[in-house]
Amino acid sequence: MTFAPGKRNLITDVGGLLVGNASDDSLKSGVTAILCEEPAVAAVQVLGGSPGSRETDLLEPHNSVEAVNALVLSGGSAFGLDAASGVQAALREKGIGFEVGPHRIPIVPAAILFDLLNGGDKDWGRYPPYRELGFEAIQNAQRDFALGSHGAGSGALVASLKGGLGSASAILGQGYTVGALAAVNAMGTTTISGGRHFWAAPFEIGTEFGGLGYPAPFPTDATDVKIKFADLDRGGSNTTIAVIATDAQLTKAEAKRLAIAAHDGFAHAIWPTHTPFDGDLVFALATGTSGIRPDISEAVELYAAAGATMARAIARGVYSATQADGDVMPVWASMT
């Protein structure tokens, strides 16, 4: 079972999606908004022990709302939940949202990661800046967007390295596409023994995150648990938040299964993951723009692609991070 990346190797290879980033360099934080050009079927799966989110209950298959207008990934811990209000305001101005009588209510679930201890200036006064960053992110929404230290990945950290915003895509033989987007801020490590080789190496396509494969010989300490801020009591200062998307036609329950399968990508790319101190969460989107509905046998390949593509997106986020003044951790590119 092999996959080829889409034209951009981004989640926006999935028809019907745009992505916008907004960042504050002094804050070392930011927001990423995923805009659905038409309402998309959505679901969510949370496996981390310290999640922070907004409007995730409505995404459960037994609840009434079938589709969403946008999703938000934000830094800022609980303060970052304000970003969804900015996205909602921008969409309302554009006349986008769930119609209730004369009103349109944009449906905008959101998730946050903790990036308050990354060296940025968090002295923002009475109100945090995330609402305005969310509004800006929607204005920036387009097919092409930057990876690494941008948007929700601006101030992300993993064990021993800067994290970042990563994305990848895969075109399946049945004619539909899978795309992943991840803001990588894990407690664990994305590289083996803290070196240059990524845990996600078996799923890499070409040299999209260095092309190094696995180290040889394989380190004897590879499965030793190395965690971020191990020397300090900073539990909860983590979280990888992500979106898995496809242009296949799925029900809400099938989208839920897609989100579950995408968490396998976390397990392939981060060690350890889904800890009590990570708020690991995956949103799923099905835009249906391919016009193709997978049958049972095709669904297996779809869910396999979800895990593989997510693993690649996570590695690309760390691989793409860039150094900035005041950083508390180095970037992957600085390693020799």
Image: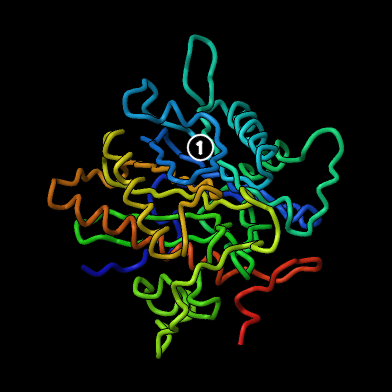
Q: Which residue is mark 1?
A: 70
Q: Give the percent coordinates (x, y) of residue 271.
A: 46, 64
User: Residue 194 versus residue 225: which sits nearer the camera?
Assistant: 225
Q: Is residue 266 left or right of residue 132?
A: left
The quadrant of the rendering that contains the N terminus is bottom left
Left or right placement of residue 50 versus residue 207 in this view? right
Give percent across and percent down for residue 261.
Answer: 31, 51
Q: The residue under label 1 is which amino acid type?
A: Ala
Which x, y percent locates residue 296? 13, 46
**235 sits to left or right of 196:** right
Quick check: can you spot residue 251? yes
Task: Look at the picture and state if 330 lies above or below 262.
Answer: below
How many discs appear? Answer: 1
Q: Look at the numbered disc 1 and give the secondary structure of its residue.
A: strand
Above or below 168: residue 139: above
Asked whether 19 or 57 is in front, the reply is 57
**Residue nearer the viewer, 23 or 36:** 23
**Other residues around mark 1 within 10 Å, as few (<14) / some (14–19) / many (≥20):** many
Answer whether residue 22 is visible to the viewer in this image.
Answer: no
